[in-house]
Image (tube, helix red, strand yellow):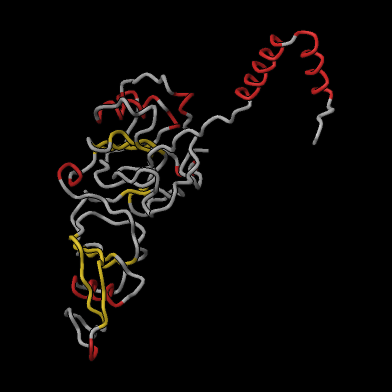
């Protein structure tokens, strides 16, 4: 049997000998207090990352690792200021912007585009871009690009409002006899695929566009690829397919454009995380 002969143990034994039960209660209190003081603090819940109900992932389906200078405890009590006090670029951010943070502690109480703009204005260089839509709420963040603007920021916005896609998720596939094709297309298919409900909202993580020019070609290419579970096609975007566990809704308010603005900045001050040096 192991006997604790440490100085702390000897001290406890002396207390027990001299004071009995009261010393036991005192030691229990000290032990509980020390345990509480050294209990690790729970991690703060991750803020929603970007508009479009994508929660904790970015628009490529990966956890958002962008470093942000926004500290909730620092600006928790930021008062809304008149957004006319800030200078804004003339373009309206009607399409999905990638890299903004939505539903953060400081933006949770914002109920309108006007309030979102005012919040961003008051945050000075800690907010360069804002976007608002009723279902998403207020989203704030760093510098974003529209197209290939001269900025080092990795964040960008769709130049057009949300639009419906043609697409589907593969529910099953089976080999057809004699290499017969079940769907029209440029090549004979050796697989027959069943598809679930049509996916009208954009799916993320499908990779680069594919060299197929029609809906049927795109669908068949996905069917022939064992690693493909989702395909999408849009006339202005092209064909995409691969694997995705996140597709946006496209119904009701989710089919409506965003409202958003960004502050004019000196491109030479923008770092590779989208913030100002």
On screen, residue 147 versus residue 267, left or right, reads left
Q: Which of 9 and 173 is in front in this view?
A: 9
Q: Position of residue 88 (x, y in %)?
A: 32, 34
Q: Where is residue 274 in the image (x, y as percent from the top left)?
A: 46, 43
| 32 in relation to 256, above or below | above
Name the residue furthest bottom.
178
Picture quadrant of residue 8: top right
On screen, residue 176 versus residue 29, left or right, reads left
Picture quadrant of residue 203: bottom left
Quadrant (top left/top right/bottom left/bottom right) for the N terminus: top right
| 85 in relation to 23, above or below | below
Q: Position of residue 194 (x, y in %)?
A: 20, 70
Numbered disc total:
0
Q: Position of residue 24 (x, y in %)?
A: 69, 15
Q: Which of 37 and 9 is in front in this view?
A: 9
Name the residue furthest front.
1
| 240 in relation to 177, above or below | above
On screen, residue 6 versus residue 209, left or right, reads right
x 19%, y 80%: residue: 185
x 41%, y 33%: residue: 127
Picture quadrant of residue 10: top right
x 76%, y 8%: residue: 19
Q: Nearer the viewer, residue 228 or 150?
A: 228
x 80%, y 23%: residue: 9
Q: Which of 104 and 115 is in front in this view?
A: 104
């Amino acid at each position: 049997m192991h006997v604790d002969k440490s100085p702390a143990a000897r001290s406890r034994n002396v207390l027990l000998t001299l004071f009995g039960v009261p010393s036991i209660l005192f030691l229990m209190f000290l032990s509980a207090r020390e345990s509480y003081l050294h209990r690790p603090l729970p991690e703060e819940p991750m803020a929603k990352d970007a508009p479009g109900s994508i929660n904790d992932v970015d628009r490529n389906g990966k956890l958002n690792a962008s470093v942000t200078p926004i500290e909730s405890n620092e600006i928790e009590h930021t008062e809304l200021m008149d957004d006319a006090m800030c200078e804004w670029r003339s373009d309206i951010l009607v399409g999905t912007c990638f890299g903004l943070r939505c539903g953060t502690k400081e933006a949770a109480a914002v109920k309108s585009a006007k309030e979102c703009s005012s919040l961003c204005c008051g945050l000075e260089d800690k907010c360069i871009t804002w976007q608002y839509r009723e279902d998403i709420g207020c989203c704030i963040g760093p510098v974003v690009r529209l197209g290939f603007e001269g900025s080092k920021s990795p964040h960008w916005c769709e130049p057009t409002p949300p639009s419906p896609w043609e697409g589907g998720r593969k529910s099953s596939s089976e080999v057809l006899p004699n290499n017969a094709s079940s769907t029209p297309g440029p090549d004979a298919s050796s697989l027959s695929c069943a598809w679930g409900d049509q996916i009208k909202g954009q799916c993320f993580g499908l990779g680069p566009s594919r060299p197929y020019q029609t809906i049927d070609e795109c669908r068949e290419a996905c069917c022939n690829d064992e690693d493909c579970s989702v395909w999408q096609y849009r006339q202005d975007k092209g064909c995409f397919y691969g694997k995705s566990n996140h597709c946006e809704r496209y119904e009701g308010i989710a089919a409506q454009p965003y409202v958003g603005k960004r502050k004019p900045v000196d491109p030479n001050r923008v770092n590779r995380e989208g913030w100002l040096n």
